[in-house]
Amino acid sequence: MQQDGARDGEGLGELATERLGGKSRSVVIGLVRMLIIANGLNISADLVELALPIQEEHFARVKSDSLMLAGEEDPTDPARLGHLSVPSSSEQKRSSYPNEPKS
């Protein structure tokens, strides 16, 4: 003796449609969409968990190497500045505003 709805060859989708009526398709589609979004968020979280330590280590190395190189360079070296010139102490005291009255 079989229970109601457990007929041979009838799938779960057909049983759900029979019991829920016409709304079952939209309900199932909505649930599948939410499941896909949840899985996407889980995958994203896993990727961030994997990549974040690598990125932090890279940033720390680049920062320490940059600070080391910056400490080795002379900021007033004309060869490093190329076409820029280092202002003399008297030029530094002058105002950088061209229209300012001279005192």
Image (cartoon, rainbow, N blue to C red):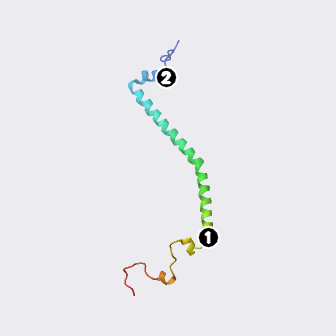
Position of 101 with respect to 83 (left or right) is: left
- Observer-nearest residue: 62 or 26? 62
Q: Nearer the viewer, residue 95 or 23?
A: 95
The kind of residue tagged 2 is: Leu
Q: Quadrant of the C terminus?
A: bottom left
Q: Secondary structure at mark 1?
A: helix
Which is more toward the observer, 65 or 2? 65
Residue at 43% across, 81% down: 95
User: Residue 90 vs residue 71: left or right?
Assistant: left
Q: Residue at x 45, y 24 (%)?
A: 16
User: For the residues marked 1 and 2, what is the alpha-carbon distance in whole angstroms?
Assistant: 70 Å
| Badge 1 amino acid | Gly
Label 1: how many residues lie within 10 Å, few (<14), some (14-19) or many (20+)?
few
Q: What residue sits right under mark 2 in the picture?
A: 12
x 47%, y 33%: residue: 32
Rendering coords of residue 22 (x, y %):
38, 25
Q: Which residue is mark 1?
A: 71
Picture coordinates of residue 7 (x, y %)?
Answer: 49, 15
How many numbered circles are shown?
Answer: 2
Where is residue 9 shown, x and y percent of the image? 50, 16
Name the side, left or right, on which 84 lies relative to 23: right
Visible residue check, residue 93: yes
Q: Position of residue 20 (x, y in %)?
A: 42, 24
